[in-house]
Amino acid sequence: MQQSKEEFLSKVNAVSKNTLMETLEIEMVDYGEDFLVARMPVTSRVHQPDGVLHGGATAALAESVGSFASHIFTDIDKYFVRGLEITANHLKSITEGYVYAKATFLHKGRTTQLLDIRVTDEADNLISICRLSTISLPKNK
């Protein structure tokens, strides 16, 4: 029996208990064959002192969704996933609402993966563009 999208996302989000993702209220909200989407509320918890979204929180959102995407599309019985490098170009400020991060694969190799992560606001305005490289390593070594 195949699980529904809601059941799958519920299981994915349950893994975030007692982590940075729970602290930042990051939740996975959609996925497809080659993408994963997460969202994070923009509140004072993720603001810089001047009241706009902190770039570090944006990078944490991007790395979370990208690493989860690599994890979901990898045989987790045999491999674990770790981030290698992340870059973030912040293009627009935001003070409230939600930001959404959509991770899509640019390269999905057996060992390394490269993801494009676009962070947008609720009106689909581009907030940041991020790139994340991940590595899949065998569990038995």
Image (tube, rainbow, N blue to C red):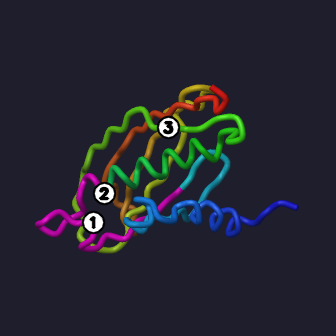
Determine which of the numbered discs, if any, sits on residue 139 in the image.
none
Question: Disc 3 to disc 1, how far (Cα)?
Answer: 24 Å
Amino acid type indicated by mark 2: Ala
- Please state, as top left, top right, bottom left or bottom right, where the N terminus lies in the image: bottom right
Q: Which residue is denoted by mark 3 in the rendering? A: 82
Is 52 magenta? The answer is yes
The three-letter amino acid code for the residue at tag 1 is Val
The residue that mark 2 highlights is 57
Q: Identify the residue at image location x=52%, y=34%.
A: 106
* Disc 1 from disc 2: Cα separation: 6 Å
For the residues labelled 3 and 1, say whether their Cβ atoms are less than 8 Å apart.
no
Identify which residue is drawn at 71% across, 68% down. Answer: 7
Does 81 sit left or right of 124 as displayed? Answer: right
Indicate the amino acid at tag 3: Arg
The picture places residue 82, in percent across and down from the top left corner, at 49, 37
- Give the tally of numbered discs: 3
Which element is circle 1 on?
A: helix
Front in this rendered view, residue 101 or 112:
112
Name the quadrant containing residue 98. Answer: bottom left
Q: Which residues are magenta?
A: 37-56
